[in-house]
Image: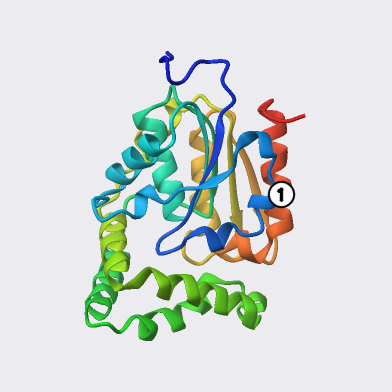
Amino acid sequence: MTTPSSPAHATPQLVFIPGLAADAAMWRAQLPAMPAELRPVVATAHAQPAALRIEDMAALVLAAHAGPVLLCGASMGGMIAMEAARQAPERVAGLALLGTTARPETPEMRALREAAMELFAQGRVREVIEPNVAFAFHPANAAQPHLVQAYLDFVLRAGAEQLVRQNRAVIHRPDARLHLPRIACPTLVVCGDADQLTPPECSAEIAALVPGAEHEVLAECGHMLTMEQPDAVNRALLGWLARGGWVD
């Protein structure tokens, strides 16, 4: 199924979707490495105040980028990408899902997020985020000041309001496992071997549910794989684009 705005022969646009509280900084190493003809861009529509649910975020990203798209999402961005593929399968030409999960929220994680949101609402963002570094990165990478500072910078830049709104959206995210078997586009699933926030079993589950999906696990890597192992992520993405026929 195609529409006048998204003809089957059109070159898709490569859209990167950041994770919770993240922005283009987390894709800094990927953007210049991607083929210019795919017009790589980092999505921002999902961060609008109107984006109260993962479903809203996906709809806003699709509305902001006309025509066929290649969606590359990390963490919450992967949740948005999977939902966009459910909403508009005819427009999503390919999916790359990095360090994410298709599962709904667990009661344990919901409790942790709600406690954090209370502190965010009190303006105590740094108090919550700084200890999170140990969970976001592989131990070796958590000891690299430039990586930690880059992470803290974009989370603090997002601010308390966005942190609360996006955590609430993640808490109420849909169970994407229900529709993953219907995905027909070329799909790449990548995770870090030491990811504590979305463990490798979550990526393995996605790859097992999506027909023909490729699955790659990066060594010595935590949840922030685009920052921790940028070269390996770039190789995986370029391989996915080549296998999909979007680049030579």
Q: What residue is shown at x 71% (from left), y 49% (from top)?
A: 33
Looking at the image, the residue that sits furthest to the right is: 248
From the viewer's perspective, is 36 left or right of 94? Answer: right
Q: Which residue occupies the foreground of this view, 84 or 16? A: 16
From the viewer's perspective, is 2 left or right of 54? Answer: right
From the viewer's perspective, is 200 left or right of 178? Answer: right
Residue 184: image x %, image y %? 50, 24
Say which quarter of the image contains residue 114.
bottom left
Q: Amino acid at mark 1?
A: Ala
The residue carrying mark 1 is 33
**Considering the numbered disc 1 on the image, is that residue within a helix, a strand or a loop?**
helix
Q: Which residue occupies the foreground of this view, 117 or 24? A: 24
Residue 161: image x %, image y %? 26, 68
Quick check: can you spot residue 87? yes
Q: What residue is shown at x 44% (from left), y 41% (from top)?
A: 81
Quadrant where the image shows the C terminus: top right
Quick check: can you spot residue 193? no
